[in-house]
Image (tube, rainbow, N blue to C red):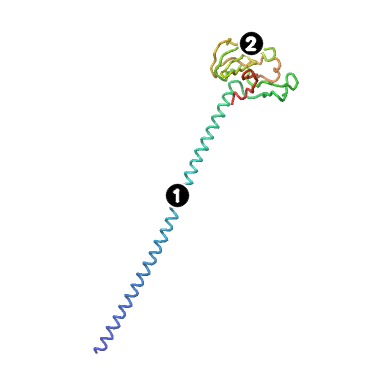
């Protein structure tokens, strides 16, 4: 009887020990997997952090580039607006360009000739405005280009506006500001009257002819 009880106790003890071993093994296995998961998570988080930093860098670069492009577009627009404004002081657009070396065609004279002036198309009767602050040198009638006004500007720059209506109110010595009306388009030129209504403008720097278009840029 005692022998059977002893065998029974040994059996339960063995069973208990097996259960404990299984439990301990399970715990060790679980801890190992948890450590592995934590380790992987750290790696993923580090990668995510790196990616986030990279993305932030890209965002900053993109933002800077966008601001630069915006500023460039703004500067370009301001320059274009300025050019259009200067051209509008005289007329609508270039009818015949300045040329001091290559002859250009004169429709009125039906010849190719040097053209040391700039012809700007304009509506008859529209205002002609001074492109800079200056002083009236003279108001006169030219046999070739009709009623003309010569203005003197800073830096030894003189500009002659021709093709103006005869009723000019300005006189020698008067001062004008940029944008002031100096006369009205009259198409009074004799050698360009078939080229369309326009203003003929000439510019001289230290008494040497220059392209008037450079003053509109």
Residue indicated by mark 2: 140
The answer to whether the residues at label 1 and label 2 have Cβ atoms under 8 Å apart is no
Residue indicated by mark 1: 53
Query: Does residue 87 appear to the left or right of 30 in the view shown?
Result: right
Indicate whether 90 appears above or below 32.
Answer: above
Q: Earlier in the sequence, mark 1 or mark 2?
A: 1
Where does residue 25 sit, x and y in percent of width and height? 36, 72
| Residue beneath the point at 40% across and 62% down | 37
Query: Of helix, strand and loop, which one carries label 2?
Result: strand
Where does residue 47 sit, x and y in percent of width and height? 45, 55
| Residue beneath the point at 71% across and 21% down | 114
Spatial CA span between label 1 and label 2: 73 Å
| Residue beneath the point at 59% across and 12% down | 137
Q: Quadrant of residue 128?
A: top right
Query: Of helix, strand and loop, which one carries label 1?
Result: helix
Instruction: Tell how many labels.
Output: 2
Query: Does residue 3 appear to the left or right of 172 in the view shown?
Result: left
In the picture as drawn, the residue positioned furthest to the right comes out as 110
Where does residue 79 sit, x and y in percent of width and height? 55, 29
Numbered circle sitting on residue 150? none
**Residue nearer the viewer, 94 or 153:** 153
Q: Quadrant of residue 167?
A: top right
Query: Does residue 179 appear to the left or right of 19 in the view shown?
Result: right
- Quadrant in the picture for the N terminus: bottom left
């Amino acid at each position: 009887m005692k022998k059977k009880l002893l065998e029974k106790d040994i059996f339960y003890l063995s069973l208990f020990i097996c259960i404990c071993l299984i439990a301990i093994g399970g715990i060790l296995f679980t801890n190992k997997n948890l450590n592995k998961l934590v380790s992987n998570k750290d790696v993923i988080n580090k990668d995510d952090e790196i990616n986030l930093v990279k993305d932030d860098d890209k965002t900053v670069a993109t933002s800077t580039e966008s601001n630069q492009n915006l500023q460039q577009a703004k500067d370009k627009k301001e320059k274009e607006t300025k050019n259009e404004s200067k051209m509008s002081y005289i007329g609508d657009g270039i009818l015949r360009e300045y040329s001091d070396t290559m002859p250009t065609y004169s429709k009125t004279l039906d010849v190719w000739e040097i053209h040391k002036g700039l012809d700007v198309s304009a509506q008859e009767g529209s205002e002609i405005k001074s492109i800079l602050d200056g002083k009236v040198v003279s108001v006169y009638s030219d046999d070739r280009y009709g009623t003309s006004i010569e203005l003197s500007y800073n830096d030894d720059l003189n500009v002659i506006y021709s093709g103006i209506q005869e009723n000019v109110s300005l006189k020698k010595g008067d001062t004008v500001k940029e944008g002031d009306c100096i006369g009205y388009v009259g198409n009074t030129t004799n050698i360009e009257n078939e080229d369309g209504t326009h203003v003929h403008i000439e510019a001289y720097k230290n008494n040497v002819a220059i392209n008037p278009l450079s003053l509109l840029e």
